[in-house]
Image (tube, rainbow, N blue to C red):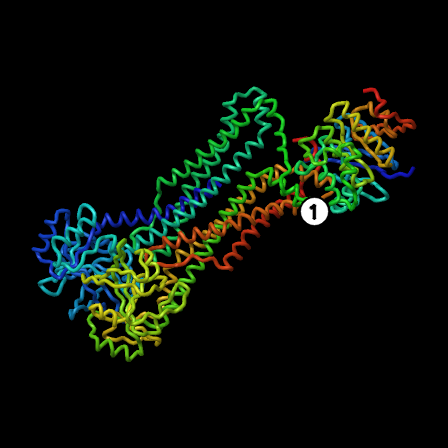
Amino acid sequence: MAFLGVFVFAGVGGESEGLEANSNDYYSSTNLADGWIYSANLDRGFLDEVYTLGPTTEMERQLVVDSVANFSNDPEITLHFVENNTISKFYLIKGEPLNISDSDGVWLDKSFADAKNIKVGDNITFEFNGFKIEKEIKGIGYSPEYVYHASKSSVIPDFSKLGFAYMSYKAFPSEIVPYNVLNVKFDGTAETFSSLLSEKMDGKYNSFVERSEHTSVSQFSEEMDQHQMMAGIFPVVFILIAMLILLTTMTRIITHQRTQIGILKACGFRDISIMFHYVSYGFWLVLAGSILGLIIGPLTLPKLFYPSMSATYILPSWKPAWSMDFFYVALAMIMMSILVSYYAVKSIFNEKPADTIKPKAPKVSSSGMIEKLGLWNRLSFNTRWNYRDTKRNKFRALMTIIGVIGCTALLVSAFGMYDGMNDLKEWEFNQINHYDSKLVIDEEASISEIDNVAKEVNGDKIMENSIEIESDSAKKSGSLLVLNHTDLVTPTDYDWNKIKIEDDEISISQKMADMLDVGVGDTVKWHIMGSDKWVKTKINKIHADPTSQGLIMSSDKLEELDLNYTPTGIVTTEHIDRNYSTIKTTNSMNDMTSSWDELTEAMWLLIYILIFFASLLAVVVLYNLGLLSFTEIEREIATLKVLGFKTGALRKLLLTQNLWFTTIGFLLGIPVGYYILKVMWESSGDSFYILPSISLTNIILTAAITFSLSIFVNLMFSRKIKKLDMVESLKSSE
Amino acid sequence: MSTIIEFKNVDKIYNSGNHILKAMDNVNFKINKGEFVIILGPSGAGKSTLLNLLGGLDTLTSGEIIVNGNHVEKFSDNQLTGYRAKNVGFIFQFYNLIPNLTALENIELMKDIADVNINGLDVLDSVGLKDHANQFPAQLSGGEQQRVSIARAVAKQPTMLLCDEPTGALDSKTGVLILKLLQDMSNNKETTVIIVTHNAILAEAADKVIRIKNGQIESISVNDNPKKVTELEW
């Protein structure tokens, strides 16, 4: 039990700790920028000004442009022309280190290179802004700015369609490099730096992105948050139950040794040596279990998660990490086992040895309320016996019920997560989005070109942008969706009912409204990322969306607010596999759902692991407590058997109690599971919105597992009843 | 009087690894209906083994045990359970009452096992414990517990009462009361009572005394004029 508890705790913990440690190592070894200043005019004067802000410690300019590489699927490669690459350094895997005086070389994204089977020494051609450059690949590796890299149209990366490449500024085809990004490192908080920047240099730059807002960093840290959340809830529930069971078992084992302790005492053993014997007995077992758990947990469990995660995120190493917390938990477990054995033995010492030698007098049953009712006499022997037995062993009953609550709660929340993940997929890809293909429009495309394509594919234009929304109480980043009477994208409420957002209305998503603490009729302030024009708008409606939180409005409304309507995509029911010059990429619904499945693989895995361990927990809890109570009532069972009770009736006797406890634990476990589920979803990141729900199937499945485990454990005991030696059990009064 | 119990050439061999113990060696005896039988012998002579075989708690190695014309040695486990439920009333040295049930409930429990229609209170009354009906075993004295135990055993109107050192855990005064109760059962209700003990004094009160030693019958004697238990010199 100690092993199991520490194993799960340290295993799941080691996974999330590992993510954090690996990414931190990676970020610091590659000197990831603290912030990025975007500006079209990064001249010497600008740099001086940034430097004189005070906190700035390092700066480096880059030109970041999107290009298309020479492959049949027109992959989108983000090119970085760097000044010296001391900040956000390229992490080399193969080839030679990035050489700043090399004008012919390119250092390419390893994931892209792998997807395309490109090697060091190959040549590659990029087209961008009318330029066409051909370079030799000198190195392949990773970049800390691309732990997570997905195109604007899809949350899931497809490494054959996109990538990045680093080059020296000398490789740029023109003398003057139009730098557009300034990587900065600074002391102090990003907030201070950001406010200094906006105060001193307002208007001279387009935007400033701090590290925690950077897409790659924030996406990965959101993922880590989710993992930490899981590491925070489930293993804790688990270890609490493990401790509970451990402690009950130890107390009872010692109580069973009562006469033995009395005899040892009577023989003249000193208290201290008896104490030492019994305390060390539990201590060594718990110690061994904990150490094994500490070692095996982090070594095995993370290995289950990392493969699916590394399909989405790019880190140079995936190693589980060890945290002192695990050690403390194990230590607490050991300390508690010592304490509990100490007090159990101590309480026996407090009696006179003469009393201790004899078995403890049975607890006196008493008649309570229920017996006084006339109904009592009509109850069967089975019910009466079990009722009184429970009453006499309240502690055992409580422990069993808590164990079952734990198991049920874990199962309910695991199945709830399973349902939630499926709901989310159904909601997003069937209830809201009804198109077959989504064409992502090139930023350079003109309105008429877009209209032509839209007409040709019979599609509707949509506009999707990142925005920042502010209310009186909070500021959050979110998304803006501009729709024009399309029935291919239909916003819904939280019950999946379609809702109509009128031309002059603005709707906010439920989760965003909750986060900003606003409702219909309130006013929010927002701006599109990359522009500093803030607008104030009143909220007319609230919609719900599982994956994107923000505002929805019509193009008329957008223009009424004096903002430019620039469509970013075209959605159509046709399956598009042609290429258009104005279209950057085309994503089909199939691509999106299958990448969604890939993204959620880690979650599924976690769910399965949870179900497995919850079941294991139930078996251990029920068996353990069942075994202890069986030894306690063995004599009674033997008597009943001698008196002529059939094995079946005796089995039923034990089963009845088991079923009572299981039923109570099960009923109480459901709300607990619901609560765990709620906490899980609420902490699943700002962009996800899933309502915790427990389906009937969930309850039936959980009931089936819990009760069949309960009956399974009972069957193990009926074998014991059959084998019970009546003669032996009756011989002495012990 | 008719023979109700018969042991024919009964052997019982315990075989634990390479250690073989012959606990019953060619045992033969007959017991008649309503007899008050004492089985005497030193510890380890095989008294308990005999009782266990007769009570259907253990199976013999060879031979025959005939009770009411039925061959007990041929019973299956299930049949043995039924046999114990209907024919045998056990009285143990340590009473073995169910601690979770009151005195009355311990007796009425028998309704669940044997198809008998009894009034638990009447049975308790017959052992003089009507006033303690709603007390739990732990609230009763040893003698009272043993009386409840006897009441429980007779409640199902068994063919025989098997008593294993029924007074072993009681003081002599209480012991006499218990034995008197058992003797009365045998005399008044024609219940066959078989008591296993190492206390030779009891022999004078028995209708029949079976002495065993080393797993064998040493002697079987019949008292034509058994004394009352209360007349014995303790």
Would residue A404 be seen by someone viewing this image from the given angle? yes
Quadrant in the picture for residue B22? top right
Outermost residue toward the front? A521
Query: Residue flagged by tag 1: what amino acid is it?
Result: Arg
Residue reaching furthest left? A45
Q: Where is residue B171 in the image (x, y as percent from the top left)?
A: 74, 23
Where is A694 relative to A74, above or below? above
Identify the image quadrant of residue A179.
Answer: bottom left
Quadrant of the frame with the C terminus of chain A? top right
Left/right placement of residue A154 relative to residue A122 reads right
Residue A369 at x, y percent in the picture: 62, 41
Left or right: residue A436 versus residue B54 is left
Please tell me whether residue A111 is drawn above or below residue B67 in the rendered image. Answer: below
Q: Can you see residue A86? A: no
SS at mark 1 in the image? helix
- Residue A626: % across, % down: 58, 42
- Residue at x 74% of width, y 47% of height: B78
Question: Which residue was labeled with disc 1?
Answer: A378
Residue A138 percent across, percent down from the top left: 20, 59
Which of B28/B234 is in front?
Answer: B234
Question: Callout 1: 10 Å neighbours few (<14), some, many (20+)?
Answer: few
